[in-house]
Image: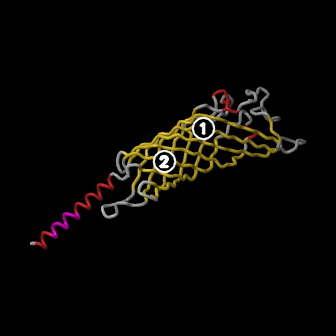
Amino acid sequence: MRVIFIRKSYILFSFVCMFLACSIHSIAQEGLQLHLSSSLGLSYMAPQNHYDNDHYHLSYKNKLSYNIETEVGYGFNKTGALLVGIGYQKFNNSYQGEFNPGLGVLTQYHKKNISLDYLSLNLVARFANSFSDAYVYDNKVQFFVATGFAANFLLNAATTYYSNDEEVSYPDKLIPYTDTNYLYQPVSDAKQLYTNFNLMFLLEAGIDVFISDKFAFRTSISGRASVLDVNQKDYRKHDKYKASRVYFGGLKLGLSYYISR
């Protein structure tokens, strides 16, 4: 009887431990979360707005862009969480082209640079899975995907245009191709060319590697795409105009802190 009692006690104890383990796992991702991260990658604005200089359609030359952001969120269960965040976005783009206007005119080399700075407010849904079970309930790695939207507010803009390495006023007609009835005047502040607000779609996929009970190192692939046209309405008046959007893709690194883990 003693052996049977010990055996039953052991089974009961094991069951309780397993239940607690499963319970701990089930709340591992619940509660408050804090995230700090930065992305480095390539961005481009496409299609480029030629401001009625469509004969001078330049080739895309991608440049490095980056962002840094912090997020706070709440996990409703071990899988799903909702995050809000604030960040700084830097998008750079360059275009280049070589043209032969005609007989007796020297070859022209053109280059355009664009830089856009945004304050970003994010709303993101995050889904995580550690693929743990009742036997391995404290997995050090979890996979996640996140998607949502960022409301971007333009902080600063810079646009420069070079012809044969000399900066020229922009936007302006580029002789000899442009119609004499040119619609636009050069601007002194490039912010006049772009909308003050833009909405972006966000998508991210990666892993959290836990370096302690609550801290995790975060690495992922991150992408963004404008939902709205980034050009001001006053600069969409010419023929053959097509809406321009900003796209970004890159590697994202950061730290996460799961307060309730």
The quarter holding residue 235 reads top right
- Give above or below for 259 relative to 130: above
- In the picture of the structure, the residue carrying the numbered disc 2 is 35
In the depicted view, which residue is nearer to us: 44 or 153? 153
Say if the magenta span includes residue 202. Answer: no
Mark 1 vs mark 2: in front = 2
Q: Main secondary structure of the magenta part?
A: helix
The quarter holding residue 58 reads top right
For the residues labelled 1 and 2, the Cα–Cα distance comes to 20 Å
Q: Amino acid at mark 1?
A: Tyr
- Give above or below for 191 relative to 9: above
Question: Residue at the spot x=51%, y=55% of the render?
Answer: 219
On the image, the x and y values in percent for residue 127 come to 41, 49
Find numbered disc 2 in the image and state the secondary structure of the residue it sits on.
strand
Give the residues drawn in magenta, as a range: 6-14
Question: Residue at the spot x=79%, y=33% of the render?
Answer: 169
Q: Is residue 62 left or right of residue 173?
A: left
Badge 1 or badge 2: first in the primary sequence: 2
- In the picture of the structure, the residue carrying the numbered disc 1 is 118
